[in-house]
Amino acid sequence: LINVLPVVSTFAEGESDSGGKRAKSSRKSGPLPQAPAEHQPFFNRLYKAVAWKLVSAGGFGPNLDHFEILRSCVESCKETMACVYVPLKDITGLPAGRTQKEGHVCEIRCQTVYMGTGYGRDEAAAKAMASKEALKVFQGRKVTVKICRRRYNGKDVEDLVLLDEQPRNQGFPPALSYPFQDEQLEEGSS
């Protein structure tokens, strides 16, 4: 009946929608191999901005407005964040214990790079949790942009992900948005 699409919000003080859709190419869907190196200088600057902001706020803690810290740091680096919201009931394939119908999931990206996912009773709570998860990455000595495998619409895709230096099992939550898709991924044809 009605096709539900995720709601995407971009947060910035001014309206600077310089993006638009990317040019389509005959290449397979996914980020270019040089994409991590192209994005790394921005995230190095963002890392420094977040470090200074957290020091001035007294450190990372539960009483911080994680979204406001992240948003102000991203904007100080002349960029915007994109938040994608999806109602929990619209997500298929959740474990049996997670099949509650209420709540929202929020995914935060900056420059098409995945930063964090959060769950909450409403969009504001989900955004707060996603921001907290994103800020956790900045707690280490450095951040790195890498191409990692994630699930999107039931398929494995390559995605740009912001990581810290901690070893992890690469068990990322499924992607709510995928900025690298082309007709091939959308239609499922070869």
Image (tube, rainbow, N blue to C red):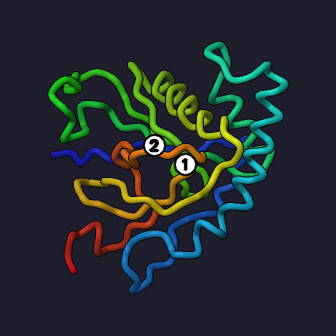
Left or right of 73 on screen, residue 125: left
Amino acid under disc 1: Arg
- Determine the residue positioned at 71% across, 30% down: 69
Question: What is the total number of numbered labels drawn onto the structure image?
Answer: 2
Q: Give the SS element for disc 1.
A: strand
* Residue 157, percent from left and from top: 34, 63
* Left or right: where 108 falls relative to 135: left
Horizontal and vertical percent for residue 57?
79, 21
Give coordinates of residue 39: x percent, y percent: 65, 63
Residue 57 against residue 116 in the figure, above or below: above
Relative vertical location of residue 54 with respect to residue 134 in this rendering, above or below? above
> Looking at the figure, which quarter contains the C terminus?
bottom left
Please identify, in this view, whether the residue under mark 2 or under mark 1 is nearer the observer.
1
- Image coords of residue 135 (percent x, y): 62, 34
- Looking at the image, residue 11 sits to the left or right of residue 190; the answer is right
- Is the Cβ of the residue at disc 2 closer than 8 Å to that at disc 1? yes
x 22%, y 22%: residue: 100
Task: Name the residue rendered at 42%, 38% in the picture.
Answer: 85
Label 2: which secondary element:
strand
Q: Amino acid at mark 2?
A: Val
State the residue position of label 1: 109
Nearest the eye: 1 or 29: 29
Q: Residues within 10 Å of mark 2 (few under 14, many from 20)?
A: many
Q: From this view, report whether residue 32 is shown above or below residue 59.
A: below
The numbered mark at residue 135 is none
* Quadrant of res 19: bottom right
Residue furthest bottom in the image? 26
Q: Name the residue rendered at 55%, 43% in the picture.
A: 166
Closer to the chain start, of discs 2 and 1, is 2
> Which residue is most to the front?
167
Q: How far, Cα to Cα, is label 2 from label 1? A: 8 Å
- Residue tagged 2: 84
